[in-house]
Image (cartoon, rainbow, N blue to C red):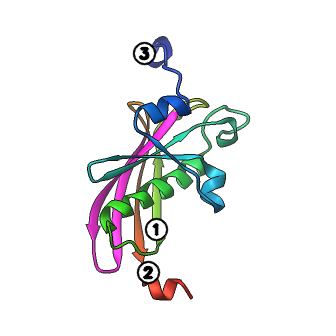
Amino acid sequence: MPEEQVSEKKAIDAQTLEAEGWERLDADGFTGLAGPIWRKVEGDQHIMGLLLEPKHCNYHLGTVHGGLVMTFADIGLGAGMSAVMGEKRMGCVTVSLQTQFVSVARVGEFITCHPELVRASKSLVFLRGLIKAGDKTIASCEGIWKLLDSAKSQS
């Protein structure tokens, strides 16, 4: 029997996440519908998390929906922008996003996205990351974000 089926998994809930230093982000718009999203700051890295609920899964399979994984990749890598921009926060939009699925996650698992800065220019930021359920990688992702002029993005 595979090890992941034999080992008992520790129940994860909001209290456990808060005790481990995670902060729940209550977002508006589409991100709010996909969430609730959690964030943990470790040094200069902003790790994002999502506790999988039935609404996040393929009804007929019981596994996380690929569209949700891609949405989470966009949110998770986008959070890497906070670390890149620091105090100079400005608007940004996703220019390109690639996601490669390598495994599955199920209801009750907590997935995380660990963004990594690849390169930043004056107007573009390149990021990559892994989406994991515990120690198991379920997807890899990479993307490009366009920095917006804050004055123009307000109009």
Give the extent of the magenta segment.
110-131
Relative placement, left or right, of 120 versus 138 is: left
| Residue projecting furthest to the right | 60
- The residue drawn where x is 48% and y is 11% is 6
Q: Estimate how packed mark 3 is, as few (under 14), some (14 to 19) or many (20 or more) residues with alpha carbons within 10 Å.
A: few
Mark 3 vs mark 2: in front: 2
Residue topped by disc 1 = 96
* Residue 124 in the image: above or below residue 116: below
Q: Identify the element where label 1 is drawn.
A: strand
Q: Estimate how packed mark 2 is, as few (under 14), some (14 to 19) or many (20 or more) residues with alpha carbons within 10 Å.
A: some
- Residue 15 lies, in percent from the top left, at 52, 30
Q: Nearer the viewer, residue 94 or 27?
A: 27
- What amino acid is found at the position of numbered circle 1 in the picture? Ser
User: Mark on residue 148?
Assistant: 2
Residue topped by disc 3 = 3
- The residue drawn where x is 45% and y is 13% is 7
Q: Nearer the viewer, residue 34 or 20?
A: 20
- The residue drawn where x is 69% and y is 41% is 55
Q: How many marks are shown on the rendered structure? A: 3
Q: Estimate how packed mark 1 is, as few (under 14), some (14 to 19) or many (20 or more) residues with alpha carbons within 10 Å.
A: few
- Residue 88 lies, in percent from the top left, at 33, 73
Quarter occupied by residue 102: top left
- What amino acid is found at the position of numbered circle 3 in the picture? Glu
| CA–CA distance in space, label 2 to label 1 | 15 Å
